Amino acid sequence: MATHSSSPSRKSLKDCVRHFTPAWFAAIMGTGSISILFHAFPYANGSTTMVVFTYIFFFLNLALFIIFNALTAARYILFPDIWSIMLHHPTQSLFLGTYPMGATTLINIAVGLIYEGGFGGQAFLYSMWAFWWLDVAISVLCAFAIVHVMKTRQEHALQRMTAVWLLPVVTLIVASSTGGVLASPLAQYSESHSLITLTVSAVLVFMGLGLALMILTMYLLRLILYGVPPSAGVLSVFIPLGPMGQGGFSILLLGQGFQSLLPLKSGGSAILQQEHAGEIISVLSICAAMVLWSLATMWFIYAVLAVVEVTHQTRFPFKQAFWGLIFPNGVYANLTVQLYRELASPFFRVWGAIYSAGTLILWAWVFVRTLTLVHNGAIFESPCLEDFDMARAEGKRVASPHGPSSAPVSATTTIACSGATMSAH
């Protein structure tokens, strides 16, 4: 893939803030998945080296999350019209789902490493539980409100469809996996709180997987009828690994959680009081995770073939869209590692370690390339906006680059052009 060609003029901080789209939270998702991989790595697991790297990536991700929140708030405060226009844009609005998914990666490590390491006690755990409920609310809003807006406020066509359609609904799956992480430590203080968390997470993951599988069916039809997306848009073919990988991981955690809580010692449910209820659910969860891992592997093969096809025909510069590669590959690697833990299979251990290392290398390359373009704002690129400055975006009369013009340029027109950049995702 070609590197970024010409070095554009430095953008002002205000202009960079204006172009700070929700898609940037894909970097939080990707960095968070790397910290999870270090925490779960199948070799030297729990060693000082792995723990230190997990902490490094966790705090780096936390710092990025705080910075991104500040930039996002500044964007909509300085340019309030952008929010409404972004919601109605058929591509940009879908990236709102990256926000709650990025936040869940922080909760996972905060519970799985920091709390389990002895920090904070019950108060810290229940604080994370409260944040999880907030994240669930945002995830549900993304999954249902955004899909509703897609149906009623936006125009879509099968030919223009990309795997980005998955982002609003995958939020349910990712939130459910964090519920699985929380359930086990919650059981130490309250079995009812743990059971509620597991039940809500089970509902979330099955709703999310149901929607994801329906969308993936349409997406496969789109690929067959119209071919793989051109240029950098081909990177989106890796997104299907996300719902499959994270869905399998979530179901594994839920199976473990129900196995530890069941059978119930009280209540009116005869099924949940059966002696082997937990074991049955656990075995079924492993079977379901294997199915999802197989589907994720299938999409991985298709994605590699698509990328080889497109890069053989054309070269494209590095863009922010490359961040969308990290999380889907990271959760696929994580599911592979978790299957090794459940099945004690050498294949899953070796393949999980290789894929985890490959994902780390990919993250390092994307991170370094991003840093080289952030310092002058080059990565915050919206080519159709280069002829318009901030004053013109507020509706003043401007001169066309090809001659004088008396037509005002509205903020709507400006931001709509900005949204077109994200279509490449």
Image (tube, rainbow, N blue to C red):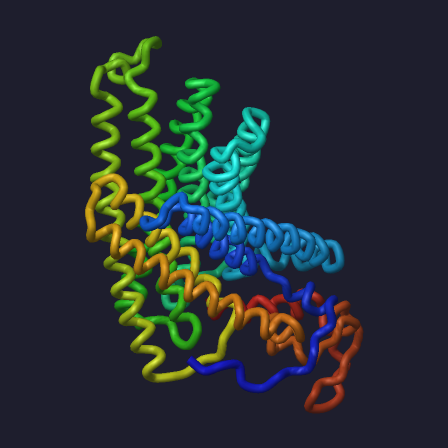
Q: Residue 326, can we see it? A: yes
Residue sitting at 37 percent across and 68 percent down?
A: 159
Q: Vertical placement of 112 versus 406: above or below?
A: above
Q: Vertical placement of 189 versus 306: above or below?
A: above
Q: Residue 148, can we see it? A: no
Residue sitting at 66 percent across and 55 percent down?
A: 67
| Residue closer to the observer: 10 or 54 | 54
Residue 210, horizontal then vertical, whole percent: 33, 43
Q: Vertical placement of 289 versus 90: above or below?
A: above
Q: Vertical placement of 145 versus 326: above or below?
A: above
Residue sitting at 38 percent across and 59 percent down?
A: 239
Residue sitting at 26 percent across and 68 percent down?
A: 224
* Left or right: 60, with 182 as reference point: right
Name the residue furthest front: 48
The quadrant in which residue 280 appears is: top left
Marks counted in the figure total 0
| Residue closer to the observer: 55 or 376 | 55
Residue 160, horizontal then vertical, whole percent: 41, 67
Name the residue furthest bottom: 402
Residue 329, horizontal then vertical, whole percent: 37, 58
Quadrant, the N terminus: bottom left
* Left or right: 286, with 182 as reference point: left
Residue 323, horizontal then vertical, whole percent: 48, 63
| Residue closer to the observer: 251 or 40 | 40
